[in-house]
Amino acid sequence: MHHQRHHVSAYPDSIPNETMRNMKTSPRIQAVSLAAVVCVAAGAVVLPSSAAYADTATADTESTATGRSLSGVALSVSPYVSGLNNPTALAAARDGRGRLFVAERAGVVRIVKSGRVYKKPYLNISSVVGSNGGEQGLLGLAFSPKFKTNGKFFVTYSARDGAVILASAKAKKSSKNSVKKSTLKTILRVPHSFATNHNGGSLAFGTDGLLYFGTGDGGGGGDPQRTAQRLSSPLGKILRLDVSKSCGKKRYCVPSVNQYRTSKSKTKRLVFASGVRNPWRISVDSATGNLWVADVGQDAYEEVNVVSTGARGVNFGWSCKEGNAGFNSSQCAGLAGYVAPVTTLCHTEAVSGCTPPFVGESIIGGYVYRGRTSPTLVGTYVFADFISGRVFGYQAGQTRQLATLGRITSFGESDSRELFAVTYGGTVYRVSSN
C-alpha cells in the first residue's frame, strides 16, 4: 500500500501541493528573512538548524561518496531583486536587452532589469487565470526563439474551469515593455477537471525550434485516472508542438518528427514522452539539445530525467514506477521505452536509510549551466528541493549538494544564459560559482 500525502490549497504542486502541506504546518517556513550573498565552498559542511526552511540563502554542502567529484565548484547565491508576488517562472527573451521576465501566480508577467522590478506589468491576464485552487495559476513562460523578429511568447495557465491552457501573446515590437491582453491566443486546451493539483505547465523550446510542454497527471494521489501511461490522454506527458506556424484551424502543427504523428488520436500525435506525475520544471541544454525533466514524486522519491529530443517512444515510468522503485504494477504494460532517472532524492519518512544530503520532497528542476561567468559550473545541471531548500548539482553521474536557498519555485536563464532562481517570497537570486 502506498501512503497518500495530504494536500492543501495554498500554492501549486506545480510548486507541489506536497510542498504546501509542509509550508502550512511549519512555522519555520512561514518565517521569511532575506540574506545577503552566500558563498559556498565545496567540501565545507554547515547544516543550519532552520534556515533551510526559510526564504533565505545559507551555506549547506555535503559531498557524495560516488561518481566523479564536483570538487572545485563553489556556489554563490545572491539577492538580485525582491518585491514580486508569488513568482512561478522566470525566462529571458534572448533579444539582447537584458530583461528578465517573471510570471506571478495570479496572472501577471513582470519585467526585471538592472536590479529593479518594472511597475507596469509586461502582461496582465489575471482576469482569465484561475488561481483559487492550491496548484493553479500562471504556470509557465517561454519566448519564441525568433522573438526579436516576431515578438511572440508563450504562457500556460489554469483557466477558471481548471483546464490548463497553452497560449501565445505578441508584442507589437520586441522592444516594447508591455503587451496587450487582447493579443492572447489559445493554442491548446488540456482538460483538467478531476482535481486542482498536478497541472504541470512547464515550457521549453528545444534546439530543434519545437516547443516542449509538460503536463501533470491530472491530480489526486497515485494517478487515480491512470492518465500517465495512457497515450490518448494529454495528462502526465511531455507534449511537443510546432508553434511557429498554423495547420488548418489549429494554431500549431504536429511536428514531422513526432512518433505518433499519424495517430487517429489528436492528443497522441503530440506525445513526445509519457509517464510523468507533475514535471516541475523542464529545460533544454542549449549545448547538447537534451531535455531535462524534474518530476515531483508521490510517496518516496523525487527524480531527474534526461533524454535526447531525438529519442522516440520515451516513457519516464510513472505510475508503474516512482523513481527507480515500483509503484503500481498494473501500470507497467508497454513500458518498452522506459528511461530511468539519472538521479533521485528520497523522502526520509518513506525510505529506510534515507539521509542527507540526498533528501527532498518537492523537486524544482533547473538548467544545465552554459553561461560564461562561472566556468567551474559549465555542464552542471543545477536543481533544488523546495522543502529542504537544498540546491544540487548533477554532472557525469554524480549528484552533490552545493548550497541552500529556501523556497525556490523556479530557475531561469538570462539572455547570456546566466542562472537565476526565484523564491516563493518574491525574490530573484543570481546563482553562480566563484
Image (cartoon, rainbow, N blue to C red):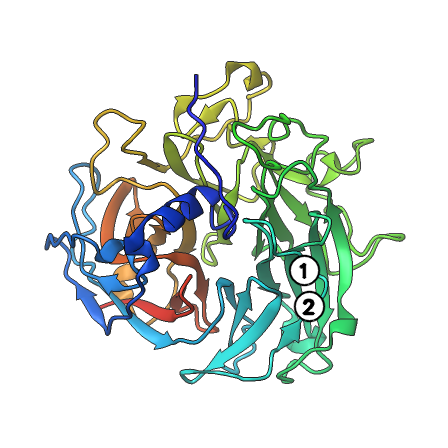
Mark 2 in CB contact with mark 1 (< 8 angstroms)? yes
Q: Nearer the viewer, residue 307 or 224?
A: 224
Q: Secondary structure at mark 1?
A: loop
Tag 1: amino acid:
Val
Point 58% across, 36% down: residue: 219
Q: Position of residue 427 (x, y in %)?
A: 39, 70
Q: Looking at the rendered structure, which numbered label has been put on residue 125?
A: 2
- Residue 283 seen anywhere in this rendered image of the structure: yes
Q: Position of residue 147 (x, y in %)?
A: 65, 72
Q: Looking at the rendered structure, which numbered label has been put on residue 129?
A: 1
Q: Quadrant of residue 203?
A: bottom right
Q: Nearer the viewer, residue 145 or 345?
A: 345
Q: Mark 2 packing: few (<14 Cα in 10 Å), some, or many (20+)?
A: some
- Residue 99 seen anywhere in this rendered image of the structure: no
Point 54% across, 18% down: residue: 332
Q: Position of residue 5 (x, y in %)?
A: 43, 33
Q: Looking at the rendered structure, which numbered label has been put on residue 359?
A: none
Point 29% across, 30% down: residue: 349
